[in-house]
Amino acid sequence: MLFFILLIFSQAIDKTHLQNAYFKGRSDRVSATGDLVDGGKNFVLFGGNLKEKKLDDHPPISVTDIGETISKSLWLGKLKKKDNPDAPTYVYDLPSANLLLINFGVDADIFNKLPLNSKLVENRIKENLDVDFFPADEVSIMTTLLTGNLPQIHGVTGSKWTENGKPVDAFSTPGRSSSKNSIFDLLKVQQNESNLHIVGAATNKVLAQAMTTDAYGASYFDSPQSFTSTDHPDLSFTWQDLLQSMSDDNVWKQSADLIAQLELKSPAVELFLMEMEYLNRVSKSFERHRDAKSFYSLATTTVGPLRDNDQVLAIFSHFLENLLTEYKTAYPNGNDQLVFVVTPSVEPHALLQSKLEGMGYPDRGLKHMNSMELNEVCGTAGAVCVGTPKGGVYYQTYQISIWVLFLALLATWSFSCNFAFQDFTQDATLYSTWVKQDDF
């Protein structure tokens, strides 16, 4: 039995999506619209002390609405200028904790295959989710969620971009971080840090930094067989520690039959199991920090590549359910948000790609195209020149305007000079006009 009706989304990337993602100097100036291949069945589950919500049909909520809902529930203030009336809201009681878990690579189709999906949706409100900008990756989505602003505003367009021809990582310097305050920036300013317990964790360092917009320490895999945490040593572990847990921990023992069917030498399976252990260790830490004001910002990324493996989906379902059970036990008044999102992708635009390759792009970098090249590719059907709305006609009109202005200035200068230096002693017409005949 399916526990979700197929989600209804906007199934295409249009110019608005491209403009929302564009940030000058970090984004490609040329992109293309098209139908979605992936990313059309994303959703979010809201749990905790929610206000009753009127059940009605409405468009999907934006990624920015999730951050806005969390921020207001924690009494941190508004992130967005305009509220979305369709987004769920929490009661005014301050929650004891907040758990934000975003599962990249998992959408409604994959979720429906999870054996324990009915327990995950129980007592939660489901909302269809729109990633309303493109291109988008895990880092730009997470930054958008936590700031309530689109990449065109906060500036984090992805995990990497180029500066002066060299690739740089997001959050590698303060200037490459978000230009807008996030939930964690507000927490840092408004709350007593001595009583805060913040965990931001993901598979790689840049995404782990994005989980708290680099306001707090990051927990991530510094190698496929080693998980490190800068602020929480108890969360750090290695592959050998994982093997020990598999033999001693009851949570792992419950999945022993499923694990036995996996190819443990596969790098993808190995990283998946390491990711499940980090969720397991976070779940065991809840009880130790139940008296602190806690915020857990976690991401998973390893399930998507293994979506066709039933054993992987069953193990993921088990650890996800265990995480939520332990969380509600330690924080009965806590709120939680479970996000399931596949990054959007579209079919390549063959004609546009052919033109760009003919010009030597993208090897030379699309950010630095000149006006003639832009004029040629912008005329391609389906192509969008983001950040350069002025086409070839504009530049022709601009040139004509410049020459007309130059000629007008030249004429004005010539007239002024002639008028200023008139001498009636050398001009008979002027002399006869202005000198009385009696003076002849």
Image (cartoon, helix red, strand yellow):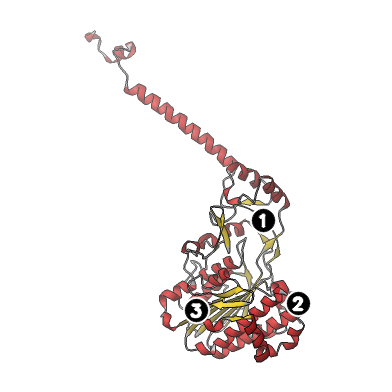
Spatial CA span between label 1 and label 3: 42 Å
Count of number-bearing discs:
3
Q: Earlier in the sequence, mark 2 or mark 1?
A: 1
Spatial CA span between label 2 and label 3: 34 Å
Spatial CA span between label 2 and label 1: 33 Å
Q: Residue furthest front?
A: 240
- Above or below for 329 versus 317: below
Bin the neighbour count of mark 3 within 10 Å (Cα to Cα): few under 14, some 14-19, many 20 and up: some
Amino acid under disc 1: Thr
Percent x, y of residue 264: 73, 79
Q: Quadrant of residue 52?
A: bottom right
Residue 231: numbered disc: 3
Amino acid under disc 3: Asp
Percent x, y of residue 182: 49, 70
Q: Quadrant of residue 16?
A: bottom right
Q: Are marks 2 and 1 in contact (CB under 8 Å)?
A: no
Q: Residue furthest left?
A: 439
Task: Say whether residue 240 is visible.
Answer: yes
Percent x, y of residue 263: 75, 78
Residue 33: numbered disc: 1
Q: Are marks 2 and 3 in contact (CB under 8 Å)?
A: no
Task: Say whether residue 56 is visible.
Answer: no
